[in-house]
Image (tube, rainbow, N blue to C red):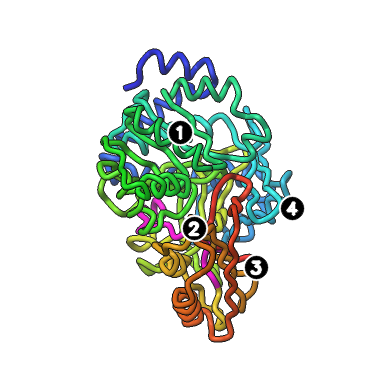
Amino acid sequence: MVSARVLFTYACCGAYDPSSLLFLRRIRRLLHQPQVYRAYCRSAWERLIRHSYDTVPYYREVFAAAGLVRNRRVCAEHWARVPLLTKDLLRGRPADMRSRRAFRTYRNTSGGSTGEPVVFVQDSRYRSRMIADTLLFFLLNGKQPGQREIKLWGSERDILENTVGIREKLINAAYNRILLNAFRLTDEIIERYVSVLRREKTAALWTYVDSIAELARYITARGQSIGGRRLIVCTAGTLYPQLRQEIQQAFPEAAIINQYGSREVGQIACQRGAEERLQVFAHSNRVELVDPDSGELIQEPGKAGRVVVTNLNNYSMPLMRFDTGDVAEAVGPPDSDAGCMQLRRVCGRENTHLISAGGARIHGEYFTHLLYFRPWLRRFQVLQPAVDQVEIRYIPAAGQTVVPPEHRREIVEKMKLVLGAGLSVRFTAVNELEKVGSGKYQFVCREF
């Protein structure tokens, strides 16, 4: 499956250990045995609960209060009584979250897009299995380890901390990967990257959603396209239908795959082939959807809810019922054994839903629809600083200086229709749109 050269390089740079492949092989085998796979996921969840009850002060406290563990038996029917784990809790009680049996740990942090980054601890077991899951979502879509790939990525943190050093270069060599830094994209940089994409016949392109959308717009604006069959794996952002359409137009032969994960818990779900739904990696992450207001488990298929994740691999600082702040929709009702097995779509961060005067949540996709394919702008961002205020920041298209009055009226009217008649809408032309510290970009953002 993996060449000797790749294995050797993985070992040298510390990006690989044999347990990654052992785990990968086991999970690939289990995926062909659904009942056995479900039993494995259930067993892994119960083992983590018992470990956390025995060794983590916070979980001993909350599990006892919930009646989750009695005489070493896990009372699954009490799971929903366990309170959601928030980033504020992680900040407030870091010592109580760590296991007394932590082994070979390292520190990681969230991106900090909504304020102070959260520090959490991961371990070698977690990292090994996260690597296996990264290989898995490529394998599920036909890309073999070691095949040439491009990673269009851009993290300000990586730039400032100079983490793209010798070790990172070795990892890129191991994965047979070309790394293109996408934190800042000018026309000159985009032109250079487009040349790389034309020249390099890679099997896959792993990219931020907004970064590949920028390249796609640049390509199609010049009446061009890039041929060749390759996977385009889009992550770190919401793959709105309009974005998928733009990317597909620029790369007509590519298979566009939506992948969902986070720094805190690794790979959560991905598309598989032509299926629109995302398969949850339930062997690594137990997923639940809860009502954004009540916190109650959502039973109805297709109803959007906050994504709550229990990572099954990190025994040093378990994250159980962790509130990711993301919103998604499930294909079917919750699975009592292995968590939510398939997602219809990931809708984005909870703060990509704007709030109306009446308290309703309006999906960010409504607002992107209003602004796509407007000839007077290149790029936009919709911000809601207060319930009765919206600001549309946009980079004007070449030669455009004002918003056409008829477009302005249409956009404002349709925003008032869902957010309230008293809404104030401001249009602001800018030279550049801000990204959050992790290099991600949100098209729609509620600021309260």
Give the mark nearest the N terminus, 2 or 4.
4
Image marks 2 and 4: residues in contact by CB distance under 8 Å: no
Report if residue 255 is visible in the image: yes
Give the mark nearest the N terminus, 2 or 1.
1
Give the mark nearest the N terminus, 1 or 3.
1
Give the mark nearest the N terminus, 3 or 2.
2
Q: Give the SS element for disc 1.
A: helix
**Where residue 448 is drawn, which disc sits there?**
3
Q: Which residue is mark 1?
A: 192
Give the mark nearest the N terminus, 4 or 3.
4
Q: Give the SS element for disc 2.
A: loop
User: Which of the two residues, 177 or 5, is positioned nearer the viewer here?
Assistant: 177
**Where residue 92 is drawn, which disc sits there?**
4
Mark 1 vs mark 3: give the one in front. 1
Please name the amino acid that badge 1 sits on. Arg
* Residue 135: quadrant of the picture: top left
Q: Which residue is mark 2?
A: 399
Question: Where, quadrant-wise, is the N terminus in this rendering?
Answer: top left
Which residue range is magenta in the image? Answer: 336-354
The residue located at (54%, 47%) in the rendering is 49
The residue located at (59%, 32%) in the rendering is 123
Question: Where, quadrant-wise, is the C terminus in this rendering?
Answer: bottom right
Mark 3 vs mark 2: give the one in front. 2
Mark 4 vs mark 3: give the one in front. 3
The residue located at (48%, 24%) in the rendering is 172
Expressed as whole percent of the image width and height from the top left, the position of residue 8 reads 45, 13
Expressed as whole percent of the image width and height from the top left, the position of residue 160 reads 68, 35
Give the mark nearest the N terminus, 4 or 1.
4
Mark 4 vs mark 1: give the one in front. 1
